[in-house]
Image: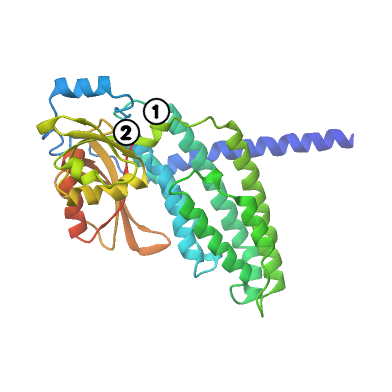
Amino acid sequence: MFLFRWLKRLVKTILWLVVIVILVPVVGLTYGFLTTSSIDKTPLPGIADGAPPKVLADKVRAEIPGYQRPQESTFLTYPEWAIVYAARDYAGFVAKDQPSGFPYWSYVGHFWQDYATVIRASSADRFNYDDHQMLVVNGTSNSIEHIVQWAYENTVGRITEAMAGKRTAADIYQARVAADYAGSLDQAPWYQFPFAQKRAGLFAVQPAPGDSAVRTSERKLAFGLADTIKQGYADLIRQGQTAADPALLDIHVWARGPVGEATRNEPDTLLERDYGADGTIFVTRRDQTFTDMIPRLIDRGVSFVEIGGNDQIMVTVLSTDAIAVPEGMRILFSYALPAQPSTRRTGMVVAVRRLHLVLPALMKAGARLEHVYDY
């Protein structure tokens, strides 16, 4: 009889957990769509200017494997980076403040608002099931993690924080771990982070003079358990991973100007085809490597024809004030960072063939390029 009652409670608990997991993206996207506006979908000014000859464009797509990337991916790549930015903001916050004060709910809300916005922005393209599945899973797990941490830090965490009266050695260690984790996400997926190693380092932390023993023990127990759960989850994901196609780590760029000279000393960059006056195609590493390269290429006189086979691309910049809108771009969203209200993030879609004009105009106005979302 006892076993039956125990099994019944276990099944009910599992069912409630399943319901909660399902409700998170449903409620999140409902909130996202209700709190964001529709998007202007008229063609961007200048998007067709300088288009390559159709015969040549068709030849490029036929002859270069992996040249054409799904256009919707420039938008659907962004929410994954939003999770990275949240980790960066958290690391910056806990470097000097206690984690109980971090605006967890604001980051949960912004993720689903951003996701709703890019769904609208990509609605004219094909429905990319794999990308959406990944975003729902990652967005749900990230939201649950934020909500659980908010609840814990504002109950048990606040009590031990008050007892300690200051940041302990364990707090400082966890702040360094948060910075290491945020930094690792630029080049590697989260599940490659060594949570078990960081847990061992936490347990080895010795209290500084005057540190609260209660706070130190609570931090070790709480974050040690969190690292154990994350390491187990990461191990499961790694076991289910297949080897990534190396081609998916690269991006093909069709550009005009002194491309050969401009890319000569750029890492992981290779010239592929030279079409004379119609431009040159090169291949380089995706993500932050390419984002960091773009301003350098523009400074060297390079302009862009297509990136990943597409003529529009999503970009985010950071600024202290609202930005003006140069011709060739359209703002998708703009908001102050919850953990750093003096800084604004603005997401926009830019005509690739105006990128060499739009980015310098934004930088001149005081904005800082955050990322170019290269499919």
Along the line of sight, the residue nearer the viewer: 56 or 24: 56
First in sequence: mark 2 vs mark 1: 2
Q: Secondary structure at mark 2?
A: loop
Q: Quadrant of the C terminus?
A: top left
- Residue 347 visible to the viewer: no
- Residue 236 visible to the viewer: yes
As shown in the figure, which amino acid type bears the numbered disc 1? Asn
Would you call the spot at circle 2 few (<14 residues within 10 Å), some (14-19), or many (20 or more)?
some
Q: What residue did someone put label 1 on?
A: 128
Left or right of 184 on screen, residue 261: left
Q: What residue did someone put label 2 on?
A: 122
Q: Residue at x 59, y 76 (%)?
A: 166
Asked if the residue under mark 1 is in contact with the one under mark 2, i.e. CB atoms within 8 Å, the reply is yes
Along the line of sight, the residue nearer the viewer: 16 or 100: 100
Q: Position of residue 264 (x, y in %)?
A: 24, 44
Left or right of 92 on screen, residue 203: right
Query: Taking 189 as reference, is 165 above or below it?
Result: below
Q: Position of residue 292 (x, y in %)?
A: 31, 50
Would you call the spot at circle 1 few (<14 residues within 10 Å), some (14-19), or many (20 or more)?
few
Q: Quadrant of the N terminus?
A: top right
Left or right of 330 on screen, residue 226: right
